[in-house]
Amino acid sequence: MAKFSHVIVRRPGKSLCDGITSAPELGKPIYEKAIEQHDAYIEALKQCDVDVTVLPAMEEYPDSCFVEDTAVITRCGAIIDNPGAGTRNGEAKEMEPTIRQFFDDDHIAHITAPGTLEGGDVMMVGDHFYVGRSARTNEEGIRQFIEILEGWGLSGSEVPLEYVLHLKTGVNYLEDNNMLVSGEFKTKPDFEKYNKVEIPEDEAYAANCIWVNGTVIVPEGYPTVLKAVQDLGYKTLTVDTSEYRKIDGGLSCLSLRF
């Protein structure tokens, strides 16, 4: 089972209000509330026995607090992504100097154009990585990604997405063979061998929980999901991510955990 020792986060900037969204009806994020929620997120992570590297805000990139999309970090090395959203394309390059504080040249690889890949489409299950083929992660990006993994003795497989933005929007692995699934992921054959906990449609957003060293962090305000995770035997913490939901973000998006 994975044991995380490091987490990287980036503070949201005031430009957060201009982040990409598929749900404008939720309104624009309120910066002051977003900062408070980010503070609470960092505190929850620290309770999970990890060192947290906090990077400064980048106003030129409204979505840059969603660091998960900039890289995929495995036990063998880091893969710098090439985000598929045009406005986010420079974020991975900005993240690389921080990644290099933890990995040398031999343990850093890159997804290059025309391949695109965002970390929100990648779910680690032991040494296997499921990769969602989405509007942000394309066939060439997945091909490069799996080739890099196999060079490190790891493996990967493609999961076509139909309705959601990212793979981990609707499916998240909690270790111990347990998986939270919502929507289209309830019936995907890729995940048949796992103990699947089905999330009701009205709490689908909370399928995006994160496991950190035996504790599961759950979005605040989703009692059915919270109880389901507790019933699996995990210690839980809740964090309000309502301001990030307004720009298509959730718990996993806000950090790189390794």
Image (cartoon, rainbow, N blue to C red):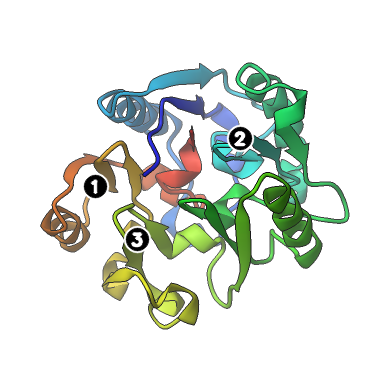
Residue 145 vertical placement versus 157 (above, below): above
Residue 117 location, x and y as percent?
70, 53
User: Which one is closest to the eye, mark 3 or mark 1?
Assistant: 3
Q: Nearer the viewer, residue 27 or 77?
A: 77
Q: Which residue is mark 1?
A: 220
Q: Residues within 10 Å of mark 2 (few under 14, many from 20)?
A: many
Residue 141 vertical placement versus 69 (above, below): below
Residue 27 location, x and y as percent?
45, 52
Q: Are marks 3 and 2 in contact (CB under 8 Å)?
A: no
Residue 130 location, x and y as percent?
55, 61
Residue type at the position of mark 1: Glu
Distance (Cα) linking label 2 and label 1: 22 Å
Distance (Cα) linking label 3 and label 2: 22 Å
Dot 3 or dot 1, earlier in sequence: 3
Residue type at the position of mark 2: Ser
Horizontal relation, residue 214 to residue 241: left or right: left
How many numbered dots are placed on residues in this image?
3
Q: Residue 64 bears which disc, if any? A: 2
Q: Which residue is mark 3?
A: 207
Residue at the image position 11 percent from the left and 58 percent from the top: 231
Residue at the image position 42 percent from the left and 51 percent from the top: 245
Horizontal relation, residue 50 to residue 146: left or right: left
Residue 22, image quadrant: bottom right
Residue type at the position of mark 3: Ala
Quadrant of image for the N terminus: top left
Residue at the image position 56 percent from the left and 56 percent from the top: 129
Residue 238, image quadrant: top left
